[in-house]
Amino acid sequence: MKRLTGILLLSLHILAFTECHQLLRIPYLMQHFLQHRAADPNMNFSAFIKIHYLGPVIVTDDFKQDQQLPFRSVDCHMLNTAVCIYEPVTVEIDPPAEIPSVFYCCNETNKPQFSSFDIFQPPRKS
């Protein structure tokens, strides 16, 4: 009983929050194909798919029937939360300012200041 309940709940979740509910429209696809086949007996299924899915969207007399076909439009609104829109970003980098090339020599006047209690000290003569 738990397994049947799990399968039922999983099926409901998949049909509600994914595009798998489009698979329930397959009978409309077959019916529409048979209508096109009755109008043009030379049409095969690949030509039918090419007209309705791979070609440009053309509004004809049977456009409402075309919109009933599976995977023709996205109905799942949960998908909109995952779509991110990226806007182009322009970055302007200013050239670096001129740095004066002044070098300081380490002599008695510019001696680094080490405190007497610092751990890292130069060796001393005893």
Image: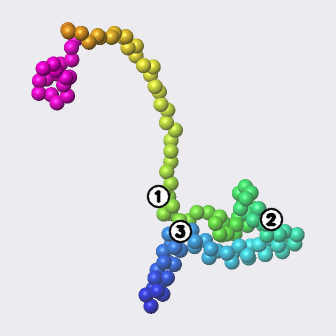
Residue at coordinates 46% horizontally, 80% vertically from top-left? 9
Q: Which of marks 3 and 2 is nearer the N terminus?
A: 3
Residue at coordinates 73% horizontally, 75% vertically from top-left? 30
Q: Is residue 117 magenta?
A: yes
Kind of residue indicated by mark 3 = Thr
Count all numbered tags in the image, as a single digit.
3
Kind of residue indicated by mark 1 = Thr
Residue indicated by mark 1: 81
Residue at coordinates 24% horizontally, 9% vertically from top-left? 107
**In the rendered view of the protein, which quadrant contains the C terminus?**
top left
Kind of residue indicated by mark 2 = Ala
Number of the label disc, if any, that sits on residue 18: 3
**In the rendered view of the protein, which quadrant contains the N terminus?**
bottom left
Helix or strand or loop: what does disc 3 sit on? loop
Residue indicated by mark 2: 47
Secondary structure that dominates the magenta span: loop
Is the C-beta separation of discs 3 and 2 under 8 Å?
no
Q: Which of 101 and 50 is in front in this view?
A: 101
> Left or right: where does residue 28 sit relative to residue 77?
right
Distance Cα–Cα, label 3 vs label 1: 13 Å
The image quarter in which residue 74 lies: bottom right
Helix or strand or loop: what does disc 2 sit on? helix
